[in-house]
Amino acid sequence: MRATSANSMNSQYNASNRTNSFRSNHEHVQTTINEKNWEWSYLVRKCRNLELEESYDIYMRRLRIGYLSIFIFIELLVTFTHALLVFTSADLTYAYVDMIAYVVTGVLIWLILSVNFRNELISKHGWLIYASTWLAVSLLVLMDIGLNVYHATSNNDILNPIYDAYTLYAIYMFMPIPHVLQPFILGTAVTICYIINYSFVISSKEANQMHSILNEAIYLSCVNFLGIFFRLMRDIALRTTFLDRRQYVEENLLLRYARDQERSLLLSILPAQIADRLQEDVRNRIERSKQQHHRRPGFDPGCNKNSQALRRWRQPDHGTLFIEPHKDVTILYADVVNYTHLTTTLDVKKLVEALHDLFVRFDIASEEYNVLRIKFLGDCYYCVAGLASPNEDHAKCCVDLGLRMIKDIRDVREKRHLNIDMRIGVHSGDVLSGVIGAAKWQFDIWSKDVDIANRLEATGATGRVHVSQQTLRLLDGEYFYEDGTEKAREDPVLQKHDIRTFLIKSLRAPMHDPRRVQRERQAKKLSEASKSNFMYNSTLQQYNQVRNQAKLEMCRELDKMPIGRIQITKICRRSTNLTQDEIEEETFRRNISSFCLLFRVRNWEIQYIREPDVMLKYSIVLAWFVYMCLLAIQLLSKDPQYHYWIYDGITVCVLTTLLIISWYKKLWIMCSSDTEQSLPQYKLSRFLYKMSDGMQSSIAIRLTVYVLVIVSCIAVTAMQVIDCGPKTDTDLIQCFHPWILTNCVTLMIGTAFLFTRIPFVVKTSVAVLITAVYTVLVVYEFDYIFAGSPSTNVNLNAKYSHFLLIIITLGIFHLMERQTEFIAKVDYNNWQLEAATYAETGRCLNYKRYDQGAASEHITLTRGRLLSIHAAAE
């Protein structure tokens, strides 16, 4: 019974070790399960199945507050900068109206959104999140569009709104409203407002009004899709990080439960002193075997075949003995009377069922009376009290157990209609206990007092407890007794040791005797403890215990999980006591550079960037969509030339090919794969499958794809200015629309940050390079065109307005990517620190699982030495 329950827990532990992790450095071909692990719907469903949604929502509320604090900082900075630029304009006649509007709006937005920092209020009134967000966004849009309408009606100045994309990015990236649907509804409403403003205010007097409106609609739609994509990617990354943390917690719990199981198994058979020595010896042997195996060339801790090396510890150590002396113990021998007759007359199945029923009762009774069962052989059952732990009532416990065993066997006799009874012998003295054997351990006790207890049982009377004079002296007169049997007086072994014997008749002490009441209370506690022991629980109960404990541990882990590199709320808080996430952040800071967010350990950074990008296909889809939007804007804003069509056709074919290849693996798995591990049979299909997989797993291919996408977007945008001549050519002053070019550049900056597994330094460098090239165009090459374009404020140089929008966009995407990179690397840093405790090089995240596999091997082999081979394997 113990073995079966213990095995079930170990099976669950082993199953956990076989579970695919969310991160894998060694699998070059991802299975279907690995693909699903990064699907947003799968992650949501898994969080719900693991009952993590509530904990995840708590963490996301903290995270959204962190992002909101960043937005408030950005809003105040943008407001101050914009007001300062307006103040530098040549004519301040209308500047004061704009500056007052910007400052008042910024302060009101800060006051409205600050309600989200009051956790108690938000927890009671969740609708305040939505109300404050809608109100703040509405105020920002009303200010931006309102100023356009005011200047158009008051002095016929047509101005361009500057906060359209800024507002949409704020909705999707910074506002505290959860999920995707609500931000999408709000973003759509904002988009419609700006398109209406563009239709009736800005482009009402343009010759190609419809083209201008379509350009604006395409641009704002593209911004919405970028915002949705970044929101979804952030949610996927955070859910993956969250599930990683939960898996880490669960693995630790399973390891702890498995070790507790091993401990309980040993203590159910061995005294604590011997169990401790055995565990220490086994651990030392496994550790020596692991160290020898680590030194072998080509060692891979993630490989299953390496675990076979751990079996070397089976080699016997002839110089090690696990024998302990014990004084003042009591030994009980019990034998089933008439057992031999039953074996010849009773069906084998019924005989085994009867013995099982009987010995289970004996095991429960022995635990209640704090008596350690040694073993049972056939119909013989013997045990000892005072061995596992000192017990001054060891003799009374054995006698009480003997009386209880007689009662139990009589119950079984009546229940099963069998002619059986018990004969019990009890003797007190000294013993040696320990484990002998190598391939199979055998725990036993030895001494002359053990032989005497055995002879007391053999010479005893049926249905009576036969005790020695040494045991009787320890009973303190609590039992009625009579002289022992004639057979005992004639036994040569008992005569040799001058043993006088007695038969216990019944209990003399009243039930309310304080000593007996205390002893029975202690026995009751031991019984309850044994029933609550997880080794007696079913597999489902064990699973629920692990799951419930994991939920509690995750509640503690929430305080340790980071919420971002930049936390404006910490600047305002002067507390000297660091929170758990701040402590973890301080630990992380020591392993990463402040500016570039690179790991100081070079191998860690190399491993990090080499991790597969399962989300690459989604990045390519959106990049393809952004390119098509840029192409549509180009075709609408300029008359297409012959060479435009050639280049556009080539780039469309290249990007479409990349799109098909990136999605081929997933589509094949969804539509044609029979099993998780199967590969396409046809050569072309297999080639495309491997190309799709290589695109995900190879950093070199990902960088190549990234460069192709960025170059394509830059080239299609550059088509707008490629035909423009020098500033002396007055016919070409309006050869392109400056605001359309600026909008396209903001989309290119967003595309530069689109790919999740491209190094952060590379993405930032590309975005800065795009901004630098754009600055050259604005300041030097085409300043005459930008200067003549509509500004965002009356009498403000239009070049400042263009440049302000670019800087705002670059700053938003850089801060968002910095926060995301920070959280991802904190999670990765934790895994690497865990790996570093197992290997100085820290080169693999599988060391922890390897150690857990070793622990599982330890448990299995320990059980195998205590139990039969087939019982230990179940």
Image (tube, rainbow, N blue to C red):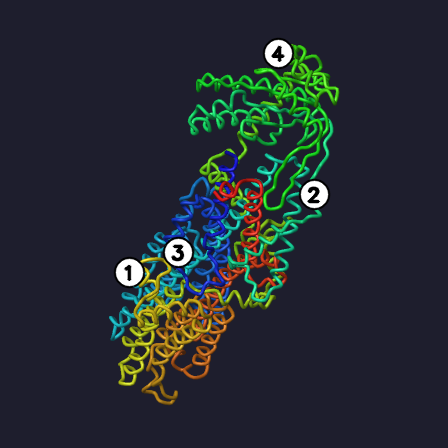
Relative to 494, is 271 above or below?
below
Quadrant location of residue 440?
Answer: top right
Given residues 747 and 60, the one toward you in this image is 60
Q: Quick one: SS at disc 1?
A: helix
The answer to which of marks 3 and 2 sits earlier in the sequence is 3
Looking at the picture, how far across and down is residue 126, in whole percent? Answer: 42, 43
Q: Is residue 566 visible?
A: no
Tag 2 residue: 321
Between 810 and 679, the one nearer to me in the picture: 679
Q: Amino acid at mark 4?
A: Ser
Q: Residue 216, relative to residue 484: is it above or below? A: below
Instruction: Give the residue at mark 4.
Output: 506
C-alpha span from label 1 to label 4: 78 Å
Horizontal arrangement in the rendering, residue 610 relative to residue 280 (left or right): left
Look at label 2 and name its amino acid: Leu
Cα gap from disc 4 to disc 2, whole angstroms = 42 Å
Residue 620 image-quadrant placement = bottom left
Residue bearing mark 1: 671
- The CA distance from mark 1 to mark 3 is 15 Å
Left or right, 756 with reference to 480: left
The reply to whether the C-beta atoms of the residues labelled 1 and 2 are less than 8 Å apart is no
Disc on res. 853: none
Residue at the spot 38% in from the left edge and 52% down from the top edge: 42
